[in-house]
Image: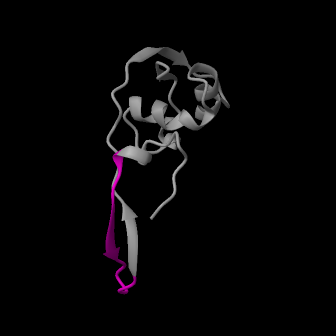
Amino acid sequence: MAVFDPKSRYVKNATTYQTKYRRGRAVVAVTPAKAPVQTTLGIHRRKQGQRLDHLAAFYIKDAYGFWRIAELNDVMLPEALSEALFIDIPTVL
C-alpha cells in the first residue's frame, strides 16, 4: 500500500489495484484521484522563471499544492504550464 502525505489528494480519493507489466511482473498501481472542486481566486500573469511551487506557496500557502494549480488549469503535468503566460490560481481550501 502506498503512503501519501496527509495533504495529498490521494489520501481519501484513490484506490489501489494490482496489475502486471508486459513481462509478467505484478505491481500495485494507484487510480487517479478525483479532481477537487475548486474556485478561481484570480489569474496570475507569469514571469519568466516562476515555478508552480513558488506560486502555490505564495497564493495558497502550500508549496506542495502546485498540483491544485495544474488541476485548475486542466493539465496533467505541471510542466505543461511552463510556457503559459496566464495561469488560473485556486482559492485557499
| Left or right of residue 2: residue 16 | left
Q: Residue at x 55, y 17 (%)?
A: 45
Residue 3's place in the image compared with 49, above or below, is below
Q: Residue 89: x, y in percent? A: 48, 21
Q: Residue 24: x, y in percent? A: 35, 86
- Which image quarter: residue 74? top left
Q: Residue at x 53, y 17 (%)?
A: 44
Picture mark count: 0
Q: Say whether residue 33 is visible.
A: yes
Q: Residue at x 56, y 23 (%)?
A: 60
Question: Which residue sits furthest right?
Answer: 49
- Which image quarter: residue 17? bottom left
Name the image colouring.
Answer: one colour
Question: Which residue sits furthest bottom?
Answer: 23
* Along the viewing direction, whichever of 76 and 68 lies nearer the viewer: 68
Q: Residue 62: x, y in percent? A: 60, 30
Residue 86's place in the image compared with 6, above or below, is above
| Range drawn in magenta | 13-25
